[in-house]
C-alpha cells in the first residue's frame, strides 16, 4: 500500500526514508527575537516523529529583522540563532526524518520593515492595486491586520535594489545556507515563489527594471541563478539545495506564466539546483485568489504543472497542493513527480505518514480545508488547526496516562463530545458516550451535507469511538434514572447549541423552517409537527429517505439533494453567519435562487478569514443576493418584508430558513450538577464556537479529566 509514496528516494546526496515532505509553512512559533525555542522545536519534532521523510522549516529569514514578514518568524541571519536551530534539527533527525529549512527574504511584503520604518527592498516600485481584502474583515481582524502599519515610526517605503544591494542579498542567502548546514540541516530550499523577493524579480508584472535584472526572462531569473550558484558554492556539492517556484501567478495580468516558469526551472537546474518545488501564487490583493494559490482549494490543483516540469528536467520535482495520498502514490508511480509535499494534512495529523505505512487509513485525522491555520498567520497569531487542538501547542498539550482512571460519561456525540471521549480513552479512562440521536456526529453530520469535508472529520472521530475503553449509547436520553444506572464518576456535557426561531411575525408559517427543523428534515429525525409543514409528496420523500438510511449519510444526502430537496425554488435565509452562508452556497449550487438577509454589516464572521473570502466570492459568482444591515419585519406567504436602513424592502421567497439564533445551552449540564455530579461543558452548549471550538474544548476536557 502506498508503495511508491513510501519508498526511499535520493535528493542529491541525501536519502529520504519516504517521499513525503512536510511543506515549508511559516508558523509564527519562533520567539519574538527570531530564536527557535521549545514550542517550535516540539512542533517540528511531532511531524518528524509522525513519519515524514523530511520536514522543511518555513520562511527562515536570511536578513532578519530586515526582509521579515511575520512577527515570530524563524531567523537564520546570524550565528546567535544556531543553538535553537541546532536543537531543532537534532530533535527532528532523532526520529529518522531529514531536516531542511526554507530561506527567504520577503521583499515588498516585508511587513516587519514597515513596522520598523525601514524601506523594503524591491526590484522596482510596486504598482498599487485595489484593496479587496479588508472589506470582509471584522474590526478585530482589521486591527491585527494593520497593527504593523500603526506602530510608532511605521512607514511604507521602498528601496529599489541596487547591484550592491543584490550582491549583499546573494551573500545573505549563501551565508544562511552555510549556517543552516552548521545547524545540522541537511538541505535548504530557496524561496523563489509566493511574492517574496526572488519571485518579485521573476514576475514581469512586478519587475520593471531595465538593467540586466529586468526585461527578458534570463534577466529576471538572474537573481535566482546567482543565489543558487552562491548557495551551492557555500554548502558544497552533494548538500541538497533546491528552489520553490511559482508555476503561475493567478489573477495577475502580465504576471508569471507557465511557459516562463518551465524555462526558469531549466535555468535553476543549470545553476545547480538539486530539485524544483512546484507551487504557484495569486494576486495578493485578492482574498479568494489566496485559495487558488498558494493554498489551493482544488485537489491536486498544481499536479499538471509539476508533471510538465518533470518532463523538461532531469532533477527531482517536488509536487504540492492538496494532494491525497492515493493520488500522490499514483503520481510518483507515473513518474510525474519525485516527492510530494504536504502542508495542511500534516497540520491536521502529523502521524499521517506512519498511519499510511501501517495501513490505518481510517485513523488519519483529515484536514477540512477551513483555512483556519493560515488565517491565524494573517492576523499575526501563531498556527493553529481547527481539527487538531495540539497543533502549535505540542509542548503543552501532551496526552499523558491518567493517574487514577475513572468512568467518564460524555453526553453528546458531536465533535466536542467525541474529541473528549477520544482523548480521555487514550489516557486510560473508561468512557460512556451517550447520544440522543441515531448517529454519531451531531450538527457536524448535518453540516457535512452542505460542506463535505466535515463528513470526513465525523468519520474519523467515529472511528476513534471504536476504542476498547469507549461504549457508545445511541438513541439515549440522559436523565436521572440513566445516571443512577450508569453511576459515572464524572460527566462532560457536549449537548450542542439550541437554535431559537427569532420572534418574527410569520415565523410559524408552513414554508418557514428553523435551523433545527431543517436539520431534522434532512437527517430524518424530524418529528411529525415538522413534517406536517410539508405537502404530501415532500412528506413521503422525507420519510422514504429516512427509511432507506440516506438521511444519516451526508454523502448520499448530498447526491440526493442534487435531484430533490423538500424546499422551494426561491429560498431566503435569515442570518448570514457561518451556517447561513454555507447553506446558501449549498442551495445555490443545487439551482435554487437564494438570498441571505443579515442584521449585521458582515457575512460569515465565524468562518476563518481566508475561507470567508472564498465563500463570499463563491456566493457572488453563484448570484446569491446578500442583504446586510437588514431586519426582517415580517414573513408573508410568498415574500419577506425587510427594513434596510429604514427603507422597506420586499423580497420573494417560497421557502424561508431561519439560520440565526443559535446559542449555548447549559440546561442539561445544570441538571446533572444539581444531581451532585462533577460536570464540565464543552462545545457549542458552552457557547457557540463551531468545529474548531468544539475540538479545542473537547481536547482540553479529555486531558483535564
Ligand atoms: C499555515 C501555513 C503557512 C504557510 N507558510 C508558507 C511558507 O512560509 N512558505 C511557503 O513556501 N509556503 C507556505 N505555505 C504554503 C504551503 O507550503 C503549501 O504550499 C500549501 O499549503 C499547499 O499545500 P497543502 O495543500 O498540502 O497544504 C503555508 C501554508 C499554510 C497552511
Ligand atoms: S486549520 Fe483547517 S485547513 Fe488548516 S490544517 Fe487544520 S483543518 Fe486543515
Image (cartoon, grey):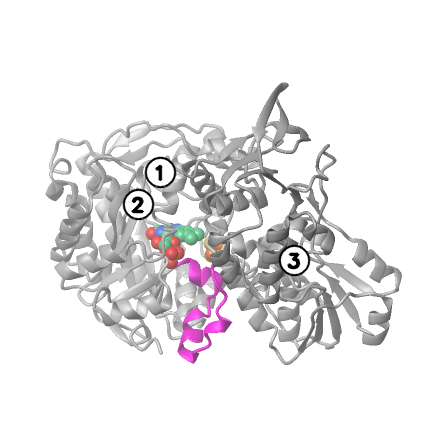
Left or right, 667 with reference to 22: right
- Label 1: how many residues lie within 10 Å, few (<14), some (14-19) or many (20+)? many
Q: Element at badge 3? A: helix
Left or right, 682 with reference to 340: right
- Pinpoint residue 485: horizontal percent, then vertical percent: 84, 75
Which quadrant holds residue 622?
Answer: top left
Left or right, 219 with reference to 291: left
Which quadrant holds residue 438?
Answer: bottom right
Of the two numbered discs 3 and 1 on the same chain, state the one appearing first in sequence.
1
**Magenta portion: prevailing SS class:** helix
- Label 3: how many residues lie within 10 Å, few (<14), some (14-19) or many (20+)? many
* Any part of residue 438 in sight: yes
Residue 146, relative to residue 479: is it above or below? above
Q: Element at badge 2? A: strand
Q: Residue at x 43, y 34 (%)?
A: 133
In the rendered image, the quadrant that contains the C terminus is: bottom right
- Tags 2 and 3 touching, CB below 8 Å: no
Q: Which mark is residue 281?
A: 2
In the picture of the structure, the residue carrying the numbered disc 3 is 697
**Residue closest to the eye, 313 or 38:** 313
- Tags 3 and 1 touching, CB below 8 Å: no
- Pinpoint residue 277: horizontal percent, then vertical percent: 26, 57
Of the two numbered discs 2 and 3 on the same chain, state the one appearing first in sequence.
2
Magenta stretch holds residue 361: yes
Whole-angstrom CA distance, mark 2 to mark 3, is 35 Å
Q: Which mark is residue 284?
A: 1
Amino acid at each position: 500500500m502506498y508503495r511508491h509514496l513510501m519508498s526511499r528516494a535520493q535528493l542529491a546526496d541525501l536519502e529520504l526514508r519516504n517521499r513525503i515532505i512536510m511543506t515549508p509553512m511559516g508558523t509564527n512559533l519562533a520567539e519574538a527575537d527570531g530564536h527557535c525555542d521549545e514550542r517550535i522545536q516540539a512542533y517540528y519534532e511531532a511531524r518528524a516523529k509522525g513519519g515524514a521523510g523530511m520536514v522543511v522549516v518555513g520562511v527562515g529569514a536570511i536578513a532578519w529583522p530586515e526582509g521579515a514578514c511575520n512577527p515570530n518568524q524563524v531567523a537564520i541571519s546570524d550565528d546567535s540563532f544556531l543553538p535553537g536551530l541546532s536543537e531543532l534539527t537534532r530533535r527532528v533527525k532523532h526520529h529518522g526524518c531529514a531536516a531542511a529549512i526554507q530561506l527567504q527574504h520577503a521583499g515588498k511584503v516585508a511587513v516587519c520593515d514597515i513596522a520598523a520604518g525601514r524601506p523594503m527592498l524591491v526590484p522596482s516600485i510596486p504598482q498599487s492595486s485595489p484593496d479587496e481584502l479588508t472589506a470582509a474583515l471584522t474590526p478585530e481582524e482589521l486591527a491585527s491586520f494593520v497593527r504593523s502599519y500603526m506602530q510608532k515610526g511605521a512607514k511604507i517605503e521602498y528601496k529599489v535594489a541596487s547591484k550592491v544591494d543584490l550582491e549583499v542579498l546573494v551573500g545573505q542567502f549563501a551565508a544562511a545556507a552555510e549556517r543552516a548546514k552548521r545547524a545540522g540541516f541537511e538541505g535548504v530550499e530557496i524561496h523563489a515563489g509566493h511574492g517574496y523577493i526572488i519571485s518579485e524579480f521573476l514576475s514581469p508584472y512586478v519587475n520593471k527594471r531595465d538593467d540586466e535584472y529586468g526585461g527578458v526572462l534570463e534577466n529576471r531569473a538572474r537573481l535566482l541563478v546567482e543565489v543558487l550558484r552562491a548557495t551551492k558554492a557555500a554548502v558544497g556539492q552533494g548538500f541538497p539545495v533546491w528552489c520553490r517556484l511559482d508555476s503561475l501567478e493567478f489573477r495577475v495580468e502580465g504576471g508569471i506564466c507557465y511557459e516562463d516558469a518551465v524555462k526558469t526551472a531549466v535555468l535553476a537546474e543549470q545553476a545547480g539546483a538539486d530539485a524544483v518545488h512546484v507551487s504557484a501564487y495569486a494576486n495578493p490583493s485578492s482574498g479568494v485568489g489566496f485559495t487558488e494559490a498558494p493554498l489551493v482549494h482544488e485537489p491536486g490543483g498544481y499536479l499538471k504543472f509539476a508533471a510538465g516540469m518533470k518532463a523538461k528536467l532531469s532533477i527531482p520535482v517536488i509536487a504540492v497542493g492538496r494532494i491525497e495520498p492515493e493520488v500522490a502514490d499514483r503520481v510518483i508511480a507515473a513518474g510525474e513527480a519525485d516527492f510530494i509535499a504536504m502542508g495542511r494534512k500534516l497540520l491536521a495529523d502529523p502521524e499521517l505518514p506512519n498511519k499510511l505505512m501501517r495501513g490505518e487509513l481510517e485513523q488519519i485525522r483529515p484536514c477540512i480545508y477551513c483555512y483556519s491555520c493560515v488565517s491565524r498567520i494573517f492576523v499575526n497569531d501563531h498556527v493553529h488547526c481547527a481539527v487538531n487542538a495540539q497543533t502549535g501547542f505540542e509542548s503543552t498539550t501532551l496526552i499523558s496516562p491518567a493517574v487514577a482512571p475513572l468512568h467518564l460519561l460524555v453526553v453528546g456525540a458531536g465533535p466536542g463530545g467525541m474529541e473528549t471521549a477520544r482523548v480521555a480513552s487514550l489516557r486510560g479512562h473508561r468512557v460512556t458516550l451517550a447520544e440522543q440521536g441515531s448517529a454519531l456526529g451531531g450538527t457536524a453530520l448535518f453540516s457535512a451535507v452542505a460542506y463535505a469535508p466535515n463528513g470526513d472529520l465525523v468519520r474519523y472521530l467515529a472511528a476513534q469511538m471504536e476504542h476498547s475503553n469507549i461504549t457508545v449509547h445511541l438513541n439515549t436520553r440522559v436523565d436521572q434514572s440513566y445516571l443512577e444506572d450508569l453511576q459515572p464518576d464524572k460527566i462532560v456535557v457536549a449537548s450542542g447549541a439550541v437554535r431559537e426561531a427569532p420572534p418574527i411575525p410569520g415565523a410559524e408559517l408552513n414554508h418557514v423552517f428553523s435551523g433545527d427543523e431543517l436539520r431534522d428534515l434532512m437527517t430524518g429525525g424530524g418529528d411529525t409537527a415538522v413534517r406536517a409543514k410539508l405537502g404530501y409528496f415532500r412528506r413521503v420523500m422525507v420519510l422514504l429517505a429516512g427509511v432507506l438510511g440516506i438521511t444519516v449519510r451526508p454523502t448520499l444526502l448530498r447526491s440526493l439533494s442534487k435531484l430533490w430537496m423538500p424546499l422551494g425554488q426561491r429560498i431566503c435565509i435569515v442570518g448570514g453567519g457561518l451556517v447561513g452562508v454555507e447553506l446558501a452556497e449549498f442551495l445555490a449550487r443545487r439551482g435554487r435562487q437564494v438570498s441571505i438577509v443579515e442584521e449585521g454589516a458582515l457575512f460569515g464572521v465565524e468562518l476563518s478569514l481566508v475561507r470567508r473570502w472564498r465563500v463570499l466570492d463563491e456566493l457572488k459568482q453563484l448570484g446569491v443576493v446578500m442583504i446586510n444591515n437588514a431586519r426582517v419585519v415580517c414573513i408573508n406567504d410568498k415574500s419577506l418584508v425587510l427594513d434596510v436602513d429604514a427603507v422597506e424592502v420586499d423580497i420573494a421567497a417560497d421557502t424561508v430558513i431561519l439560520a440565526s439564533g443559535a446559542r449555548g445551552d447549559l440546561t442539561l449540564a445544570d441538571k446533572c450538577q444539581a444531581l451532585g455530579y462533577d460536570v464540565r461543558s464543552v462545545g457549542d452548549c458552552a457557547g457557540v464556537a463551531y468545529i474548531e471550538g468544539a475540538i479545542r474544548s473537547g481536547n482540553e476536557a479529555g486531558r483535564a479529566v
